[in-house]
Amino acid sequence: MTTRAIAIVGGGISGLSAAWELQKRDVPWVLLEAGPRVGGVIRTEEKDGFLLEGGPDSILAQKPEGVALCRELGLGDRLIPTNPELKAVYILREGRLHALPEGMMLAVPTKALPFLRSGLFSWPGKLRMGLDLVRPGLQENGDESIATFLRRRFGQEAVERLGEPLLAGIHAGDPERLSILATFPRFRELEAKHGSLVRGMWAAPRPRPKPGARPRAAFYSLRGGLRELVDALVKRLPPGSIRTGARVRSVAREADGYAIGLEGGESVQASGVIVAAPGPRIAPALEGLLPDVSRSLAAIPFASSATVLLGYRREDVTHPLDGYGMVIPRTEGLRTTALSFVSTKFAHRAPEGHVLLRGFLGGVRDGGVLDLSDEEMVETVRREMTPVLGLKSEPVLARIFRWPGGTPQLEVGHLERMRDVERAVGEVPGLHLTGAGVWSTGIPDSVADATRVAAAAGERIR
Ligand SMILES: Cc1cc2nc3c(=O)[nH]c(=O)nc-3n(C[C@H](O)[C@H](O)[C@H](O)COP(=O)(O)OP(=O)(O)OC[C@H]3O[C@@H](n4cnc5c(N)ncnc54)[C@H](O)[C@@H]3O)c2cc1C
């Protein structure tokens, strides 16, 4: 039996960020990770000169906590921005690629001429989107789906061509189910404040780079991939405090703290617990302690997906790959939901004379995707992308990463349900909850929430 101050359950970026915060506060902790390695869905590999990101590949700069953590860990000079020259994002429509018009901020057009010239939308569709400028904003603040919200502001065409592939696509989700308040709260804030998304975007302050300085990129990665972030955290944390192969099976209260039961029968004593593992996976361990919370966590849907990395000789891809990649609306009838032009998006991703593509399969629109074999996944992406990109041969490299239940679906009403969960957890002294699918999805939000929770846990110990 080991006695420790705080046990952290789960060793993804959330659990590691919590450990880092406790470490800085001199609060002892032990991290219990079920798998053989930490990092969770962050997974980088190298093969034949290609740098392969199996899970996340970029950190959003607008939410500062992800990039700030990299800098704090001494990785400032390893940060690399997305390509500042070739920034196109394409949408596939009727088999043809249409670049998102210049000035498009996610789903909101902010520049009239490029929007009007774009072949992505029909004329009635453009007119309907323009009504956003004059239609009054919603006066209540209840939740609604991404689709309902976009349909209200911009009409059905915007739901099909932007909302589904782009906004819901980021979450591998269904726009009719995902909560606008949990996924894109800023849109509702803009509507409430300005009565219109377009006018809200016009009014939003733009960060102005200092004279002579390069404009800030929207996304960053690390030269050697996001594994560098995980490695840097592990290097700065005391060896021996991170335990892999430690699957938590039960969390029970004791007179002066907690007994955490591991698979295999061992019990770890702790004065507090930070749960940083995905809800459905940790729910059974909380059943005895907080049955209602356990049920709510078990009910958070998580979508399964796979990433398909394909390396090609440059001359075997006809398309110029002059952008970050494409998203593919469900109406196209393909299984590939999106495809990144990885070696255009970031430098140092493919050897000289080669390019790297990354296709996405699965998500809620294709629940059975993980039944496909690796070969079938490669063949699906290759076959579907051949006419779109003019692929002339077999890839020289193919690697699949599978993510069963990897992406939380923050559905309508999610925030309210989590507020109930947090209230119940708050009544159990020393128990804390963070991690993907509670308040956050994405690296910056995960870092921010885990840091907040660990700071509160550390304060309590003091
Ligand atoms: C394919 C893909 C692409 C993505 N792309 C991006 C992107 O480009 N940018 C971005 O910001 N975000 C992206 N995300 C989202 C982002 O990666 C996640 O939101 C974030 O990494 C989640 O971190 P986490 O620590 O909360 O969860 P996880 O990474 O899921 O880690 C949870 C950990 O808990 C462990 N665990 C589970 N059960 C137990 C148990 N009973 N006992 C002990 N340990 C347990 C698991 O083994 C795992 O290691 C992507 C996600 C996926 C799947």
Image (spheres, rainbow, N blue to C red):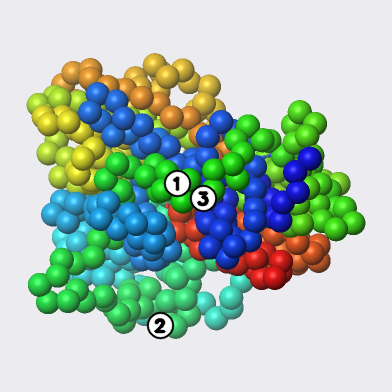
Q: How far across and down, in percent of the image, does residue 170 sit?
A: 42, 49
The residue at which mark 2 appears reads as: 194
Amino acid at circle 1: Lys
The residue at which mark 1 appears reads as: 235
From the viewer's perspective, is the residue at label 3 or at label 2 nearer? 3
Choose between 336 and 454: the one closer to the eye. Answer: 454
Q: How far across and down, in percent of the image, does residue 60 sit?
A: 36, 58
Alpha-carbon span between mark 2 and mark 1: 47 Å
Q: How far across and down, in percent of the image, does residue 339 sit?
A: 31, 38
The residue at which mark 3 appears reads as: 237
- Residue name at image x 76 percent, y 66 percent: 426
In the displayed structure, does residue 34 sit left or right of residue 17?
A: right
- Residue name at image x 63 percent, y 35 percent: 34
- Residue name at image x 72 percent, y 39 percent: 248
Amino acid at circle 2: His
Alpha-carbon span between mark 3 and mark 1: 6 Å
Instruction: Work out whether 203 lies above or below 408.
Output: below
The answer to which quarter of the image holds residue 428 is bottom right
Quarter of the picture containing the C terminus is: bottom right
Mark 1 residue's CB less than 8 Å from ligand 1: no
Label 1 near label 3: C-beta < 8 Å? yes
Q: From where the camera sits, is residue 384 visible?
A: no
